[in-house]
Amino acid sequence: MCLSLILSNLSFALWPIYLIEFRDLWNFSNTDVGWISGSYFIGYLLLTPIYVGLTDKYDPKWIVIVASFSVSLGCLGLWFFAEGFWSTCFLWGIVGSGLAGTYMPGLQVLNSRLNMNDRVKLTPWYTSSFGISNGISFAVVGYIFSNLSWQVACYATAISSALSGVLIIILVSTQNKQRSISNRKFFDLRPAFKNKEALGYILSYGTHTYELFAYRAWIFTFLIWTSLKTPNYISSDFLSLIIGIIMFLGMISSLLGAKFCLDYGRKRVLMIIGGSTFLFSIICALSVSFSLWLIIFLAGLYHFFIMLDSGALTAGTVSASDDSERGAILAVHSIIGFSGGAVAGPIIGAILDINGGTDNPSAWQFAFITMGLGSLLVFIIQYKSILSNKIRSKIN
């Protein structure tokens, strides 16, 4: 499942890598390209209630297969039909809608085949594979960006997504009987809002995802600008490789954060991570005029901080939900989580436009601080949850 997720998500960096090229080609504003970045997550949000909701009744294996091939079709559509703002939004949204059927339904493939102890231990490995896939995507698509054409990038990612579906067909066993969904209706997502424990993790995941995908949507553009304004110019393919390494290290960070949560208490550790990451976003904001390699180091460290709570938040939602309602709760987890991703690109694009554009250092300073607000909200949500638990325990 981890390998399948990596293959199906090779397309993730298509737009972030080619953002500058298409912005200049079609005379887009930074807000425009931010909305195209957001369309990926809008597509994800529209299909998530359907795909994830179906996993409570049917074997999620087949949902992952269908979604993998839809990602492939979306990438091919970008190759043949993208020619402006609306067509690119629509087609990039199709690619994002495919992620809705591979990421959380893929987790449900594991949930339906593992016991609770293994779920809690292995969920961070699976969710961290999403970060690995992002890193590999930046490295591969970045190489194609520097040496070949964007059409080749679309073709390569389409093939990779199709291989993901084939891999599931061959290697994942089929569960034949339908699964129980109690008396809950298909689109009834109320279990997530009734489960206060899970809801705290879900809301935190939303603000975390906002920060994470704001970073991933704009980091390539930021580092290209940083490189061009210094004597120590670094080529775009080398920068994309650096970003790929940063994304890979994010997996280690996510696993490390999940282990800390198991050892020292999930809510307390998440609160500390949120506060620390927000402070580090301010450090990154102050560093935009530093030397190139120091900026790259600090940008990588910021991503490491962001990823510390990634797997732990999803594992928290899984552990706080029952088998019969987990699909509905994970659907809300995905909807709220990737709503943050949908607004992240446009918000940072607007911040950059308001403050003078991508060539203005102060614009990037405001952008980093705006990203960091996601972790500040994680800190606040987890602090309030800890406080509420203490009050309830005293009352009891």
Image (cartoon, rainbow, N blue to C red):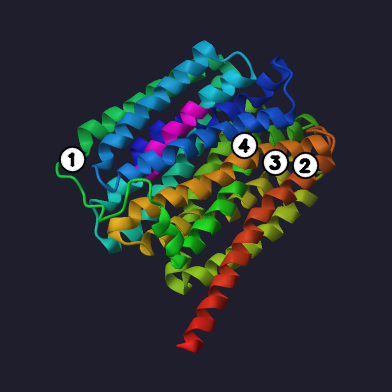
Q: Specify which label sits upstream in the sequence, 1 or 3.
A: 1
Q: Specify which label sits upstream in the sequence, 2 or 4.
A: 4
Which residue is tagged 3?
A: 347
Where residue 247 appears, as percent x and y from the top left, is: 53, 43
Whether residue 9 is visible: no
The boundaries of the magenta stretch are 93-106
Q: Residue at left 55%, top 52%? A: 206
Q: Residue at left 59%, top 61%? A: 378
Which residue is tagged 4?
A: 217
Which element type, helix, strand or loop, lies under badge 2?
helix
Which element type, helix, strand or loop, lies under badge 1?
loop
Where residue 104 appears, as percent x and y from the top left, is: 39, 45
Residue nearer the viewer, 9 or 69? 69
* Residue type at the position of mark 4: Ala
Give the Cα separation between the discs numbered 1 and 3: 42 Å
Which residue is tagged 2?
A: 364
Q: Residues within 10 Å of mark 3 (few under 14, many from 20)?
A: many
Which residue is tagged 1?
A: 173
The quarter of the picture where the N terminus appears is top left
Q: Residue at left 59%, top 38%? A: 243
